[in-house]
Amino acid sequence: MSSGRNYNFSPGPSTLPLSVLEQAAAEMVNYRGAGMSVMEMSHRSDSYISIFDEAKADLRRVLNVPETHEILFMHGGATLQFSAVPLNLLGKTGAADYAVTGSFSGLAMKEAQKYGNIHVACSSEDRNHSYIPQQSDIKPSGGASYFFYCSNNTIYGTQWKYVPETGGVPLVCDMSSDIMSEPVDVSKYGLIFAGVQKNMAPAGMAVVIIDKDLAGSEHALTPKLLSYQVMIDSDSMHNTPPCYTIYTLGLMMKWLDAQGGLEGMRKLKAEKAKLLYDAIDESEMFVGHAEKAARSDMNVTFRTSGGELDAKFVKEAEQAGFVNLKGHRSVGGMRASIYNAMPYEGVEKLAEFMRSFEKTNR
């Protein structure tokens, strides 16, 4: 990679496009003649309001968010939404259905249990979250205010290939790891949220996209900054928002446009994922964690025959310029996160390294 940069396969915070980083660097000290950095601007100033409004409008356009839904920029990343969702949405029945297909949906379920009656509608825990349940495996409670699932499981490398049918129950989805990687029919969802540190911006914020009809019935004890209605009414500015993260998100939306938008991302991610999965499937050394039907296009999880060889692979890969490949402790092995900004060249070279490593370590 140019500029002495490594190929960064981190699951998050993830790699950002070099062109975006260079633009941010060029504007760091004096933003377009404003005489100050974006980091120094009042969030109420005309200069910053222009940045904010353009970033939000571009996000709405790129993701094709209908006017029925509001876009919110909220503190705390995706994890704080594990609390915000039940506090805001459980009011109708006091109950919700959760699909537990990985670590984060499990954590979201446990958090929601503090606030109401939570039913596990389906789970993949029986096979260490290596698969995604089929529609026929989903057993709804019949009295849920919403149905929650996580579309891509970063740790385990699995991904939902369909949108669950819920019989009219509002659908809530944590899309942190695959948002902006392909077109989404936002109208199907009551609420989408995503930590921005994978495909949208530096860490420090969650994007929330909510059907406005669902807001306004939060629990009386809901903190103001977790109230979707308060955030809608204040246009995400009840207090100082994550200003620089929003600015960078705006740069990322322009970058996405230049790559062909979400259709361009869909094509690119399929090509990148195929490179790594082919390297795994053609290998006698590497084995994937996720079952083929559920393989993620964002997080490729794999391992060798033993822990010592895994460690050797990670060490030698880092020496070759491929960093942050060590898998999560619950899965072991390796994980290559190939989000939007990971160039095709980086994935191609990693696949070549995998084949070379196998030849020299038979």
Image (cartoon, rainbow, N blue to C red):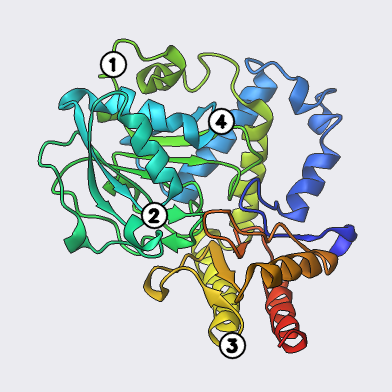
Q: Hey, which residue is sitting farthest left in the picture?
A: 142
- Eye-nearest disc, 2 or 4: 2
- Please name the amino acid that badge 4 sits on: Asp
User: Residue 97: horizontal and vertical position, in percent?
Assistant: 23, 41
The disc placed on residue 317 is none
Horizontally, is 244 left or right of 221 in the view?
right
Label 2: element kind: loop
Q: Which x, y percent locates residue 174?
A: 41, 44
Q: Earlier in the sequence, mark 3 or mark 1?
A: 1
Q: Label 3 vs label 4: CA separation?
A: 52 Å
Asked where in the image residue 89 lies, by quadrant, the reply is top left
* Location of residue 176 in the rendering, given as x and y in whole percent from the top left corner: 49, 46
According to the picture, the residue beneath numbered tag 2 turns out to be 184
User: Circle 1 sits on which residue?
Assistant: 219
| Residue drawn at the location 80% of the way across and 70% of the way down | 316
- SS type, badge 4: helix
The first of marks 1 and 2 along the sequence is: 2
- The residue under label 3 is which amino acid type? Glu
Quickly name the residue at label 3: 284
Disc 4 residue crowd, few under 14, some 14–19, many 20+, Cα 10 Å: some
Q: Amino acid at mark 2?
A: Val
Disc 4 designates what residue? 53
